[in-house]
Image (spheres, helix red, strand yellow):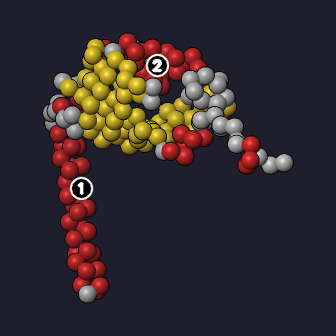
Amino acid sequence: MRRILLILLAGTLPFAFMSCNNATETSSAAKASGNNSAAEKNLASSKIITDAFKTGDQSKIDSAVASDFVDHTDHGVVKGSDSLKAMITSIHQNYADMKSDVIKEVGDDEYVFTLMHFSGTSNGTMGMPKGPYDMHTVEVTRYKDGKAVEHWGYMQPEEMMKMMPMPPMPAETKKK
C-alpha cells in the first residue's frame, strides 16, 4: 500500500510544479505585453510603500494609499493615510540605520503578501528595547483600485518576544 501511495505521489508532483511554472510564465507574459492588471497595479503600489519606508520619501504615498486607509496594529486600528506618513517619519527618526528587504512578494486583484526582513538598531523608543534588532514580518495589504485600503502585519512570536521588555521574575523563582 505504501509503495502505491509513493508512486502516485511521485507521479503527481511534476504536474504540480508544471502548474506553478505556467502561472509564472503567464504572469511574465502579461508583464511583457504591457497588460496593466489589477494585481500589477497592487504590486506597483506596494513597491511605492516599501520604498517610502526604506528612504523616508513620502512624496508618492498618496498615489499608492487611499485616504481612508486602515492599519490594524498591535495598538488597535489606526485610520488615514496621514497616519502611515507619520509612522514613516517616526521610524526614520527612531531607527535611522534600519534596513529592509523584500524576500518574497505575491499579489492578486485584491491582496499583496510581502515577506520582509528588517534589521538595524533601536534607540529604545516605540516599544522596542535599545540595541540591535533583526526580524522578519509578513505584511498583508488589501487593495482597491490600485490603492492600499487596509494593512495587517505579522511577526514570528519568538522574534516578537526578543523585542519585548522582560517582566520581573516572581520572587519565588529568583535565584538566591
- Which disc is residue 67 wearing? none
- Which disc is residue 20 wearing? 1
Q: Nearer the viewer, residue 10 or 28?
A: 10
Residue 153 percent across, percent down from the top left: 40, 34
Residue 93 percent across, percent down from the top left: 57, 16
Mark 2 Cα-neighbour bin, 10 Å: few <14, some 14–19, many ≥20: some
Q: How many marks?
A: 2
Q: Residue at x 38, y 20 (%)?
A: 78
Q: Nearer the viewer, residue 141 or 79?
A: 79
Residue 92 percent across, percent down from the top left: 54, 19
Q: Residue at x 31, y 32 (%)?
A: 141
Residue placed farthest to the front in the image?
Answer: 172
Cα separation between marks 2 and 1: 36 Å
**Quarter of the figure with the N terminus:** bottom left
Q: Residue at x 70, y 42 (%)?
A: 169
Instruction: Give the image quarter of residue 11.
Output: bottom left
Q: Secondary structure at mark 1?
A: helix
Q: Nearer the viewer, residue 40 or 90?
A: 90
Q: Is residue 3 left or right of residue 123?
A: left
Mark 1 Cα-neighbour bin, 10 Å: few <14, some 14–19, many ≥20: few
Q: Amino acid at mark 2?
A: Ile
- Residue at which label 2 appears: 88
Instruction: Indicate which label's residue lies in the foreground, 2 or 1.
Output: 2
